Each structure stands twice: as structure tokens, then as C-alpha cells.
Image (spheres, rainbow, N blue to C red):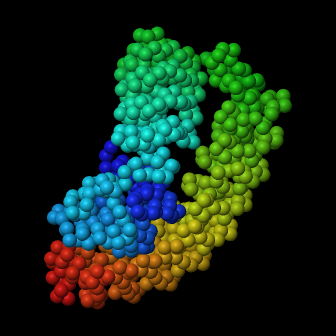
Amino acid sequence: MGRPERAALWLLALLSGVALAAVSPPRADEHLEPVKAAVRLKNFSEALRTLRPLAEGGDAEAQYILGTFYLNGLTGPPDAPQARAWLEKAANAGHARAAFSLANLLASTDPPDPAAAERWLNRARELGFRAPAAAASAGGRSAAPASLLPAAQITDPAARREAFWLAAASDDVPTVKLLAAHPELVNDRDDFGRGALARAAETGAQGAVGVLLQHGAAVDTPDSAGVTPLMLAAASGDAASVTALLKAGARVDAADQRGNTALMYAARAGKMPVVQRLLEAGASPLLRDVQDWSALDFAETSGATEVAARLRERGATALHRSPIIETAPTTVQHATSARDLYAGWPDAAVAAGRDAPTLLRAVLSHGADLTVATPDGTPVLGWAALNSSPATVALLLDAGAPAGRADRRGSSPLLLAVDNGRDDIVGALLAHGVSADGGHDDAEAPLLAAAKMGRATAVRALLAAHAHVEVRDRLGTSALMVLAHSGDLDSVRALLEAGAAVDGVDKAGRTALWYAARAGRAEVTQRLLASGADPQHADGAGVTPLIAATLGGSVAVTEALLTKGAQVDAHTAGGDTALLLAANLGALPLIERLLAHQADKDAQNAFGDTALIIASRNGNLALVRRLLAAGASTLLRNKDRFTAADVAAARSFGELASLLKGA
């Protein structure tokens, strides 16, 4: 398992409350949940975007985690100077683990700094940190930071399960062995029915497959679509995993809900070694799925000529299509053989899924029950919303189909139409009086779902049908915030005209203006300001829209906010002003605008750093010269009693140090 995967496992443990000796587990702060979710998906860029404003706003836990991002090189090459800077900030704020990590970092630099390492190690101890016995002391070269938080120390059950699944998918055999000691994990499955064995099979993680089978993983457990680990392994092309699963008793001809077997999966993927192994194990090339396709059909369609030739040798034949029926059907005819595409389906559902009004009317004329559902739990109207036409939807509504009934995932027909981009169906449903707010069981309001998925036409249709504009998700996010962030000016305008609260806040205290500013959406920012948005409103970390715009690097948004009276020297909970943060980013155009609006060039944050000290620490000669030209003081010291010249000298920036000493 490579650096990103190991770091992801370590960060998952960190974010989920790992117990270290003599240190209470960190509180699972809600504001870090988006970071945790992004790390689980290994979307480190998104995690970094979420972390940075929190860290720059003075959140010590976020500063610590951000330091580990740079230390592990999760979004690029490892960056020890950046890691050190953020770990120092967190450690100075009393973060025990940051102090300990900083000690390890200083002990392992080239050359090492044993005195500083010892100082931070002592500070970590003062803060209550007791390192695990296996961790290296600050006096010697440390192992990778991940060694401080091994998987064995994950105490949260959900985090342990996520770590187990991540290890299985990435073939991290040691971690799989370690966590498989918890028997409940081995066959635990997610909401879609997939567990560790399925994940390992899907990625061809043959080592993990073997360990999981040894620990009693159920070899034939299907997911919610009937897909087994053998099918996933066959699709991945990993012959070793396929062999291991077959030896463990996997049924070679098991079929998913659509009748597809492992041989069909392998044929579609063109995996000749796997096809050969399955045939040797007795897989039948004669089987057909619900579409009447055999493995040979899949091989021919995917251009796998070698696989197709082998299957023909074993007697497989390709699909023989039935002749096209020119007349409109008026009855649902079920096959007399065992292989019926619509076996178990009510006639109303079959007719609803086809754009065949004559058939649907005939079924309705016989008193079809419109409260029934497909075998997977999708109501008749929902099935039509996904697969048919507005005319079919209108027929069903006129016949009394319940409009608010949700499927098994909690989606009403309207929400299904929104999620799947069926603007025509959204219009048909709304035209027949279906509530624009969806059903009471909806997992999310249709308006919010449309906003998040960028469905501008659906947003406007829902607003025209008087959808409630202040619906929120679990984080308190509104449609206006989502669209402000995405930059959809027309939809933002429509929401405001419909009465959306321009200064509504989410659970983090952020407004639509904050999101527009952070994303650099100049036109949306101007529209919100024109509608009375408060340019001074800060979020829970003290980050104002101006500071958010600075973090986003947008000169245009920064200028728009300053022109509307945003306080240029407003500061975060950690004392950082826009100028200080712009200095850390090295954003000279932003600094020019801030200085033009009389920003305090000598403002100091909670660590005592000035913009000049920050620029010196980063070795930014051009920025140092600009700040000196603006009259920045070279005499101010931070809480470590360092001037800008001291910081430059400590970083071996000789030219900078000389310039500052001579200023």
C-alpha cells in the first residue's frame, strides 16, 4: 500500500477519535466531518480545501491535520517546511500531538535539530502526551508519522470498519490481518451489501482476498444487485483472486439480479485468463441473462475476439433477436419459459416503464393497482419517472398513482426525476400539482438536490411551483449557498426573487456571500451585496467574506467586498487578517488591493506573526520588499521573540536576512 493509502488510513483514525496513552480521545467535531468524508474517498484535494480555512482561522486540530497532509505529501510532494509551520501553530496553541509530531519531524530533518526536538518533546509531555511504546523517541530518527496511530488503536467501530474496508481494497495485508481479529468486521456490509471481500475482489487485491477467506469471509454473499465477490474478481481480471474464491467454494454459475454470471463479467472485460479459469471450474457458456445475452454476446460486443473464439469452441451462441413487432401492444405477455425478463413484475410496472400509452391504458382499464412497486421497491410512478415519458407520467397521475410514495432509498418520483436529470418529468409532475417539496420521506428536498447537481432548469421549475426556498441539509446548507458557491447567477437571482434569506447561515455560521467569496464568484458576490448581504458576517471561526475571498485568491471579489465597506482588518479567531493570510499565500496582487484600502501592515495574529514575518518565513523576497516599501516594521517580534530578520536567518534565507537587518 502506497503513501496516500497509508496516510488515508492514518488520517481516518485521527479524525475518528483514536485513543493514545494518557490522552483523551479528541472530540469528533462536526466541522471536521466533511474532511473525514473526503479522506474516506481519498479525495485529498477536497479535504485540503476544507481544512485550509479552518486552519487559517485558528483551529488547532485543523492546523495539526493540515501539517500531516504536507508531511505525508497527500496533495503533492511532501513539504516539510509547510508541515513544520502548521505543526508549530497547532503546538503553540496547546495541541499535544502536534508538539510530539513536531519533535519527531525536527529529529528526522537533514540535518536534525535535536535541541528543538527535545524542547517540543518536553512540551508534548507537559500537555499530557504519552507516546506509544513502539514510537521512536525524539532523539532518533522517527518512523513515518503513521506509526504513531496504528490501526490497532482505532476505537470507534465505524472508523474501524472503514479502515478495514480501505485496507482490503488497497491490499494492505498486515492491516487486514490486524483488524480481522474483530470477527464482526469480516462479514460486515455497507448499505449496498458490499463488505471487505467484495472490495478486495473488485480491486484484484489477491493478498487481502486470501486473508479474508482464511478468517471466514462468506464467499458467495451477494450485494443488493446480486453481485458476488467472484463476479467482481472476474471483472477485475485477477485470476489469482478468482482461483482463491473458487477453491473456497464460490458458486461458479451464480447469477446477479439480471442473470449475469462471473463468466459474463469476465467476457465483457475481455479477461482471457479468468475466462479460461472459470471454464475449467465448470462455468457454463450456455447460460443467458434476462436480456437473453450469453457470455459470447458480451465478448463480441466488447471486441474480445480471443475470448469469443474460446467461448464458441465451448458451444456458446450469440443472441438471436426476435423480429420487431410493428403494432402497439395492448397486453403484458410473460414468457412461458423460466427466463422471463419481467418475472415477478406487476403489469402496471411493466407498462409504466415503457413509452407505450396504448399498453398502459389497456392495463389501467383492467383496474391495475397503482400502489404496487417493482421487485427492487420502486413505485410505479417512480419507475415511470426514471424510464418513460411525460405522457406516461401524466396518465398515471390522472389514474390516481400516489405522487409522494418513496422508493427504498427514500426518493419520491419528483426527487428521482431531479436526481436523474429528467427535466421533462419534473415539469410533468409539477404541472399535475405534485408538491414541489417532494414527499415527506425524501432523503433530501428536490430543490436542494437540484441545486447540488447543477440542474438549473429543475431549480427554476421548482421555484415557479413555489418550492420552499429555505430547505436545509444536515449541515444547514441552503440552495442559495450551494448555487452561490457554484456561480449560477441566474438561479441565485431566481432564489432571491423567491424570498431566499440572503444572510441565512449554515451550522458553520457561513452565508451565501461567504461561499461565493470563497469560490471567487465575482458576479454572484455583487448580486448578493446588491440584495443587502452583510459583508461583515463572520463564520464560527471568525472568517469573514473578505477573508474567505483572500483564501480563495480572488482579487475581483476582494475589491467588490472592500468597495461595499468590508472591514479590511477584520480578523479570525486566531487573529489572522486578510493581509496576513494573503502574505502566507504570497498573493501580491491581493496584498496591493488590501494595502490600497489601508490594511494594517503591522497587524499581528495570535502567534505574534506579522505579514513581514510570514513573508520572511516563506522566503518571499518580492513580498518582503513590497511590505518594507509600505512601511512594515522590522522591529516587531512574534511570541517566540523572533523578528522577521531572525526568522529569515533561521531558515537560511541569507539575502532576506541582510535586507531586513539593513532596513
Q: Quadrant of the N terminus?
A: top left
Pick the front one: 95 or 519: 95
260 relative position to 97: left or right: right
Residue 221 in the image, given as x and y percentages of width and height: 53, 30
**Placement of 530 over or under 104, stated as above or below:** below
Q: Quadrant of the C terminus?
A: bottom left
> Can you tell which quarter of the image residue 461 is in?
bottom right
Note whether residue 293 is visible.
no
**Placement of 453 over or under 520, stated as above or below:** above
| Residue at position x 80%, y 28% in the image | 362
Residue 378 in the image, given as x and y percentages of width and height: 68, 38
379 relative position to 510: left or right: right
577 relative position to 195: left or right: left
Pick the front one: 155 or 63: 155
| Residue at position x 42%, y 21% in the image | 247
> Can you tell which quarter of the image residue 372 is in?
top right
Pick the front one: 116 or 319: 116
Note whether residue 503 is visible.
yes
Pick the front one: 228 or 43: 228
**Placement of 62 over or under 18, stated as above or below:** below
| Residue at position x 61%, y 71% in the image | 504
Residue 381 in the image, given as x and y percentages of width and height: 72, 40
**Placement of 248 over or under 165, stated as above or below:** above
| Residue at position x 25%, y 60% in the image | 137
Residue 252 in the image, given as x and y percentages of width and height: 48, 20
Total numbered labels: 0
